[in-house]
């Protein structure tokens, strides 16, 4: 039995997923490339929204409304919810190619920040007044991102 280990060293503050500058000879993406990139990002947003909605719905139904934070079923649902949101955030990030219009990139960054705030409020068991405010901000960010998709002709 053998074990292979790989070590990658990146400059301080960078990771293997850090955005690297383009080395192409053109300074801007072609309009069709931008449109295709926008489609990819906006489809990613729709899938993200659906996945997060399903996972959070299960969390709200099983854990929050039932005020059951400690049972094995509840802990399983919490694990599902938190890991699903993480997976969906990663999925959405993989849909952001270099040609995505800045308006969409910025809107999706707001979606990311706001869903992290929702999950944080849920994880900390914040009162409804706090978590509902986070959910409202997330909903607003989703609407803005969907509007950005429509404004670029996608959506």
Image (tube, grey):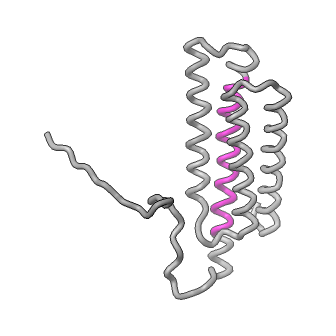
Residue drawn at (67%, 39%), measured in percent from left and top?
52
Q: Quadrant of residue 123?
A: top right
| Nearest to the observer: residue 74 or residue 149 | 74
Say left or right for 19 vs 56: left
Q: Which residue ends up furthest to the left in the rendered image? A: 1
Farthest front residue? 12
The image position of residue 69, as x and y in percent, is 65, 16
What is the x, y in percent for residue 68? 67, 13
Residue 94 appears at what percent x and percent y?
56, 57
Q: Residue at x 61, y 13 (%)?
A: 70
Image point (44%, 60%), residue name: 16
Q: Nearer the viewer, residue 45 or 70?
A: 70
Compared with residue 92, is residue 37 higher up or lower down, i.e. above or below?
A: below
Range drawn in magenta: 37-60
Q: Is residue 155 magenta?
A: no
Position of 18 with respect to 153 (left or right) is left
Quadrant in the picture for residue 28: bottom right
Question: With 103 as the anchor, is 98 left or right in this view?
Answer: left
> How many labels sit on residues?
0
Left/right of residue 84 with respect to residue 57 in the rendered view: left
Q: Find residue 129 and report its horizontal and vertical position in percent.
A: 86, 28
- The N terminus is located in which quarter? top left
Which residue is painted at 84% across and 40% down in the image?
136
Reply yes or no: does residue 58 show up in magenta. Answer: yes
Classified by dominant secondary structure, the portion drawn in magenta counts as helix
Q: Quadrant of the C terminus?
A: bottom right
């Amino acid at each position: 039995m053998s074990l292979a280990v790989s070590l990658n060293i990146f400059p301080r503050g960078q990771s293997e997923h850090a955005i690297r500058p383009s080395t192409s000879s053109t300074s801007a993406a072609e309009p069709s490339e931008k449109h295709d990139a926008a489609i990819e990002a906006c489809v990613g947003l729709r899938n993200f929204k659906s996945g997060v909605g399903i996972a959070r719905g299960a969390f709200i139904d099983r854990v929050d409304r039932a005020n059951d934070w400690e049972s094995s079923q509840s802990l399983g649902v919490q694990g599902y919810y938190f890991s699903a949101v993480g997976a969906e955030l990663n999925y959405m990030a993989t849909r952001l190619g270099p040609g995505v219009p800045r308006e969409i990139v910025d809107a999706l960054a707001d979606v990311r920040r706001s869903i992290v705030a929702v999950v944080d409020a849920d994880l900390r068991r914040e009162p409804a007044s706090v978590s509902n405010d986070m959910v409202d901000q997330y909903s607003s960010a989703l609407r803005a991102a969907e509007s950005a998709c429509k404004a670029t002709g996608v959506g």
